[in-house]
Amino acid sequence: MSLFNRKTQTQSTANGNNFLTELALATIHDGVIITNRSGVIQFINPAAVIMLDCGSAENALGLDYGLLLKLESKEGRELLENENPLIQAMRTNQQIENQAVCLVAGPSAKRIPVAISLVIANNNESNRIITFRNITKELAEESEQAEFISTASHEMRTPVASIEGYLSLALNPQTATIDERARKYLTSAHSASQHLGRLFRNLIDVTKLDDGRLRPNFEPVEMVGTVKQMADNFVMAAQNAKLNFQFGSNDPATVNNSGRLEQVVYGYVDVNFLQEIMNNLIENAIKYTPAGGSIYVNVLGDGDRALINVTDTGIGISSDDIQHVFQKFYRADNSDTRTIGGTGLGLYLVKQRAEAMGGHVWAESAFGEGSTFYVSLPRISGDEYEKRMIAVNNAKMVPQTPVNNNNQGGKQ
Ligand code: ADP
């Protein structure tokens, strides 16, 4: 039987190439589905039939793609419509290239990690060609590599901390006497050991976030107060760097006679993740802004999102660099950044943490004038916040079940 359904099949080519095309589509291990522009399935190859566990190609033809291609995030989280890459690509006529997601396949809802792509055919029908590749093995290999990096970083962190500690003692006039030349060498060694320590801590976080060991612990949060508290921790550091530091909008349009208009914005986030994100963004703003500059941190409600911005008037990022700064180990290389230390992992961790909470990050910048980093996180209504707070408080009040009834007074 032909791979192609005769009702919807593309016309055979006169030169017989169709046979080879069919053969190729029948033998590859990647799933291939072709839909019309409304998303109705017109073709499905055998690999897709097996992966989606739909029995036969005939069962799939004529169905809406969404009935078969159910997706979750690569971490296994349910995707909202505006987060589902297929739905978005179908709606906005955009392509997708190798996006890692989890396929929820067939009646047994088996989870298969896949890299999914969508290409729009350049024909009258504007057919959508969706391909998906099982990446279980790749992920296992990546996870082995990550495990190695994580173990190595753990093992190296302890001796590095000890080197850092001894160098601090050597540099402290109360614990050691050294001459000026030795001080110069040891100061360099001390700052290098601090850099290594930071690198290992970041590497451990990267591997844990990449392989899903570090998962967010969601709780209802009043965002404005929480982010303000986090930002306030940096008031001293900003002062020491001779920077003006302000929480709240710097836009005169949001200020009224009685002061600043403060919105109440509720979010459903992991507070530790949020803290790490704010630490990274504000530390960078301080690091990359020369003395005399300003830093503004603000939170706004933007539809169903809570939008945080960290704005600085610092060195800025060129348009070539800005598309890469959230990648692992990427550091802009120019005369300004060369003298400023860093690991190139901070913004990658910001992105990973924000995305793990269902959020997004992006940056806008004018080179030489300053940068704004945005973090958009899921927002909840006041009612939803109250409900979730009651649930959290109730959970806290539920007495813990004793582990062993015969040993209630003993140590557990
Ligand atoms: P690093 O440890 O190098 O700061 P990050 O991942 O935090 O690593 O940032 C990646 C790169 O993005 C930095 O090396 C720097 O070039 C650029 N960058 C980040 N934040 C800023 C900022 N506020 N202003 C200018 N450049 C920035």
Image: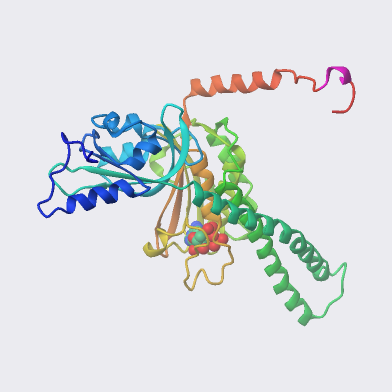
Q: Residue at x 21, y 34 (%)?
A: 38
Quadrant (top left, top right, bottom left, bottom right) of the C terminus: top right
Q: Nearer the viewer, residue 79 or 231?
A: 79
Please say if 346 is above or below 171: above
Is 332 magenta? The answer is no
**What x and y, as percent, mark residue 246?**
53, 48
Q: Position of residue 158 (x, y in %)?
A: 76, 59
Q: Position of residue 2 (x, y in %)?
A: 22, 40
Asked if residue 147 can be seen in this view, the reply is yes
Q: Quadrant of residue 365?
A: bottom left
The magenta-colored residue range is 404-408
Task: Name the residue located 57 percent from the left edge and 35 percent from the top edge.
Answer: 225
Please tell me which residue lies in front, 350 or 105: 105
Vertical side of 217 occupied by 336: above or below: below
Q: Is residue 263 visible?
A: no
From the image, give the main secondary structure of the stretch colored magenta. helix
Residue furthest to the front: 1
Q: What residue appears at the point 64 percent right and 47 percent down from the top-left corner?
A: 233
Q: Nearer the viewer, residue 259 or 242?
A: 242
Residue, x 68% and y 55% (percent of image)? Answer: 151
Point out the residue furthest to the bottom here: 181
Q: Decide if residue 380 is on the left or right side of residue 32.
A: right
Corner quadrant of residue 389? top right
